Image (spheres, rainbow, N blue to C red):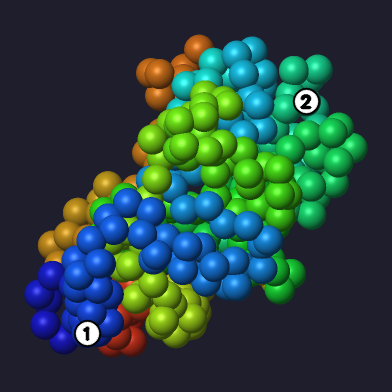
Amino acid sequence: MSTSMIPFMDLKAQYLAFKTEIDNRIQRVLDHGQYIMGPEVRELEDKLINYTGAKNCITVASGTEALLISLMALGIKAGDEVITTPFTFAATAEVISLLGAIPVFVDVEFDTCNINAKLIESAITAKTKVIMPVSLYGQPADMDEINEIAAKFNLFVIEDAAQSFGAEYKRKKSCNLSTVGCTSFFPSKPLGCYGDGGAIFTSDDSIAQACREIRIHGQSKRYMHTRIGVGGRMDTLQCAIVLAKLERFEWEVQKRMEIGQQYNQLLDKAGISRVQLRPDRTSVYAQYTIKVINRETLQNRLAESGIPTAVHYPLPLNEQPAYKNLCCPDCTPVANELSKQVISLPMSPYLKPDQVQYIAANVVA
Ligand SMILES: *Cc1c(COP(=O)(O)O)cnc(C)c1O
């Protein structure tokens, strides 16, 4: 096997595999010229409703915007508390802080890296309004346990499903597991566009209506601004690209799961610690992540063999300068330890079995 660089994720191979569909879809938008809120926007929303089983879908400008608009639709305001995980991308907490609300960080499980549902109840106060779990690396969090706690304390649940679109929890699709589900179509996510994009899912019609209005500057109809909103639309071209990719998305999800399985078998045999999958759910492996003690040494060794790696995430959010004052440095010991150990290996539906073997062999070496 040649040691030429293996791509960390292979967007080029994906484009070549879908070229005709994607090019045709783009050309159609150029021909009709409705770049904002063109027919592809509604078409995509309808197809995503079909796919997830959620009653409503509102496409938006990004995954971050999806989270922000959802919080706004739920009426989250300054001083409210939102329980979330510190072991995530900054966007999860950023949108909470932007509204003047307070992210309350609850520690994660060492084996799945998702929020530890057993620790949530003790973090609830009179100010808590929302629980926002993240379905990290593509695997849904413990949604039943989280929904149960939310019901008991009358809270909303927003699943940050930016990494888990296509995954299943007890045979239900991620994004359709709680009050609201938010995903991202950032190019490197399991279902990506060629720029920024995202979507909000909810089966609550009044929350859906609020999200739709907030997406276009709080308008209930043209120039009637009934609430504060944002410019948060996903443009027609990006919707067209997702529509083209959706045609083969199930095939890609299957491939991701097969490749994940192959990694699991090879690495388990060698005793390498990895993110564990719960038996009642699937992962779309937005990232394939292992845990090692000597991360930097491994990263350098893999780089020398043409294998790129990444770290998701090198610091839990409560250790980041912008969020440091929100949580004591030692109050999420598991997230702190994981941030020192995790390393993500190349993952894409277009990785070949011999490439996976080559990567695993180099990890073990
Ligand atoms: C990517 C990501 C986001 C943000 O999505 P964008 O489309 O990049 O704005 C939010 N949360 C998580 C967990 C993510 O991985």
Judged left or right of residue 171, residue 213 is left
Q: Secondary structure at mark 2?
A: loop
Residue labelled with disc 2: 124
Q: Quadrant of the C terminus?
A: bottom left
Residue at 58% x, 26% y: name it. Answer: 226
Between 56 and 110, the residue placed more toward the observer is 56
Q: What is the x, y in percent for residue 268?
A: 51, 73
Q: Is residue 251 visible?
A: yes
Q: CA distance from mark 1 to mark 2?
A: 51 Å
Quadrant hosting residue 115: top right
Q: Amino acid at mark 1?
A: Thr
The local crowd at label 1, few if under 14, some if 14 to 19, many if 20 or more residues have their Cα within 10 Å, is few
Residue at 19% x, 54% y: name it. Answer: 300
Q: Is residue 114 visible?
A: no
Q: What is the number of the mark on residue 20?
A: 1
- Looking at marks 1 and 2 on the same chain, the residue that comes earlier in the sequence is marked by 1
Q: Amino acid at mark 2?
A: Ile
Q: Quadrant of the N terminus?
A: bottom left
Judged left or right of residue 29, residue 169 is right
Residue at 74% x, 18% y: name it. Answer: 127
Q: What is the x, y in percent for residue 282?
A: 60, 70
Between 54 and 323, the residue placed more toward the observer is 54
Image depth: mark 1 or mark 2 in front? 1
The residue lying furthest to the right in this view is: 152
